[in-house]
Amino acid sequence: MRERSSKSRNSGRGIIGGVLLLMVFCVSSAFGQTSCEDKVPAECVATEVVVRLVNPADLAAVAAQYGLNATPLGQVGLPPTFRLAITDGVKVDNKVQQLIADARVSTAEPNRKFFSVEQEGLPWTIGRSWAIGRSWAIGGSSKGFRRQWFPSGIRLEEAYAASGTRGLRTDNGQPVKVAVLDTGIDPNHPLFDGKLLPGYDFIDNDSDPSEVGALRVGAFGHGTAVASLIALTAPDAKIIPLRVLRPDGTGDLWRIAQAIIWAANPDGDPNTHDGADVINISFGYPEGQQLLKSLLDDCGDGITTDGTTFPEIGENQLVIIAGSGNGGNSSPIYPAAELEIRAGRDPKPFDGVLSVGAVTRFNQTADFSTVVPFSTLALAPGEDIVCAIPGGRYGVWSGTSMSAPIASAIAALVKARYPAALPKDIADQLEETGIPTPPFGVDRIDALSALTTPIQNRPQANR
């Protein structure tokens, strides 16, 4: 990846982004009477709505009636979901309410923003940001990084020895690929030497997903930290960095959807598969988003609850790992909560998607970890985790942002060990072979059990 010189960036040379620890989780509270674009910080992209019609041929008529530009800013899926500009000055939330009252409209939602939880004034985090509390500290070393507590806690070395893989597929010797959707990555950090595949920057719309910003400011370093845990846990796997979050930790629904599609199918040819096997997500929002739910469902097993398909990803299926949140409560954070809630209330679970909370070095559920009652959830180490940070340095973090990439890396190892396994099989394997942890009895992922318990009677994967 090239050194970025055409953009004004004080990056400390960082490149991609990570997942949860700063918890690039979105922020928000109830909307009340304030439009999402009027909040501080704004919770949606002003003057845009995301709309799916019962009959796409009605687009011009619906746009004319509701003050929208009939020429989409973008579209994905079948039937298509359109990103449309508001032209009459009506607030986004009010426009959404107008649209969903129309029988011609299947779904309408804001182009929701996602935020890192280190921002001040967020009601659903308890100080687990990199500048507050004990979630972030500069320190450590490459030796401390490699000798930290969590690898032995999940029996990682034993898993390597018993399975015969550290991230290379046992059928063809090729590396499993993990896409990291976050703030970018520092491609020049020595830890990533030989471990990166080409990625993309969906913020600046170019092929250089280098991280942007300065240490201790905003979400800078989050992506590098997340990716480093994948590199440590599955050292022979490859990382695909996708920058979907700005230096302040904000991104939006549409860019995230585009990045997921790119991760599944980077060459745009539905008949080939050169994309990721696993996607790591460590951001979210306290409300579900229909477009994201449908897209992740299609990536997981090709079957969506609303009948939407995404030809853009072809037949490719991926394991989706999402951090559960750092609220220290039971308030659901999406998209992780889609799995948690649907597993208990819907006969069809959110196949191929695993929500991951945090466990401490004492094998207890971390007090900051979001746990939704009666949900499907796995735990992974997330307290006092040594990670890489931009500039060739290391830091110590806590949060489910750290748990998610560790789980993603173990998912990559399971894929390497059992190449024919479907995404839902891999997600189930991580959860079902875990070790119960107090106080909730949620299973903590165990690498040795996940890699040595046979996955039996599973259909052949389509790739």
Image (cartoon, helix red, strand yellow):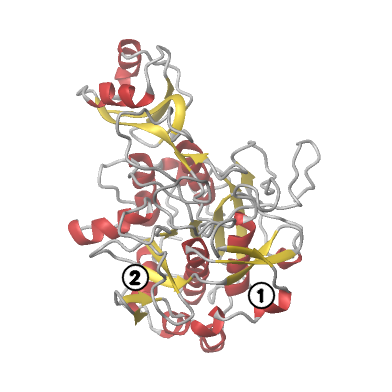
| 306 relative to 395 in the view: left or right | left
Q: Compared to 341, does 161 lie above or below?
A: below
What crowding class fits label 1: few (fewer than 14 Cα within 10 Å), some (14-19), or many (20 or more)?
some
**Which residue carries the number 2 mark?**
428
Q: Can residue 194 be seen in this snapshot?
A: no
Residue at 45% across / 53% down in the picture?
316
Mark 1 or mark 2: which is in front?
1
Task: Identify which residue is drawn at 65% across, 48% down.
Answer: 217
- Residues 447 and 367: in front is 367
Q: Quadrant of residue 446?
A: bottom left
- The x and y percentages for residue 244 are 56, 44
Residue beneath the point at 38% across and 67% down: 427
| 186 over 170 or under it: above or below | above
Q: CA distance from mark 1 to mark 2?
A: 29 Å
Question: Is residue 390 shown to the viewer in this render?
Answer: yes
As drawn, 292 above or below 460: above
Q: Amino acid at mark 1?
A: Phe
Name the residue carrying label 1.
Answer: 145
Disc 2 element: helix
Residue 139: x and y in percent read: 70, 69
Quadrant assignment, res 325: bottom left
Mark 1 and mark 2 residues within 8 Å of each other at the beta carbon:
no
Image coords of residue 429 (percent x, y) = 37, 74
What kind of residue is marked 2?
Answer: Asp
Instruction: Mark 1 or mark 2: name the one nearer the start of the chain.
Output: 1
- Where is residue 214 shown, x and y percent of the image? 71, 49
Residue 187 lies in what quarter of the image? bottom right
